[in-house]
Amino acid sequence: MYCLCKDGIAESQLQKNIDFACGSGADCGPILQNGPCFSPNSVNDHCSYAVNSYFQRQSPSGADCNFSGTTTLSPNPPASAAGSCVYQSTAGNNGTPWNTTSSTPGPIGPMGGEPDHNSAPTLCKPTLIFLILTIFFSSL
């Protein structure tokens, strides 16, 4: 299954979906300029690739395909993606993940269903302690 952005959604909402997915573990490298999934260069196509990547990576942890109702599950990959663009899909018939070449990117839903676009990134305690100690010892 592929998680795809719906048509007819405001570009500002699609951009929020891209920002959330790319900032939360999606592999968004392929939709960067000169990447294999950059074309077609549209917000909807980039949104679909970003949220699909997020969904495929996070669904084992409970993520679903629901970005405030702006995405949908599809048994088929998007039709508009470039031939060199590969979309990851959920498990195939034998229960293992498989990749397929598709023409359009697919969106992904965050864990719990609704993205929180206003939340700030958090640091885990070991990272925070390391940063504090680094600053402390560099000032000596």
Image: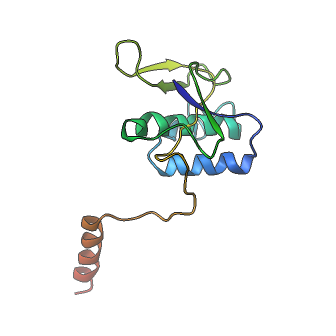
Q: What colour scheme was applied to this rendering of the protein?
A: rainbow
Q: x and y percent of residue 129 in the render?
A: 25, 72
Nearer-the-camera pick, 113 or 41: 113
Horizontal placement of 9 versus 35: left or right?
Answer: right
Horizontal placement of 130 versus 81: left or right?
Answer: left
Q: x and y percent of residue 5 in the render?
A: 65, 35
Q: On screen, 22 above or below 51? A: below
The quadrant in which the C terminus is found is: bottom left
Q: Residue at x 45, y 41 (%)?
A: 63
Q: How many marks?
A: 0
Outermost residue to the bottom: 140
Q: Residue at x 56, y 22 (%)?
A: 84
Q: Residue at x 44, y 46 (%)?
A: 25
Q: x and y percent of residue 53 in the render?
A: 49, 36
Q: Quadrant of residue 46?
A: top right
Horizontal placement of 116 versus 133: left or right?
Answer: right
Q: x and y percent of residue 76 in the render?
A: 58, 18
Q: Residue at x 56, y 19 (%)?
A: 75
Nearer-the-camera pick, 40 or 95: 95
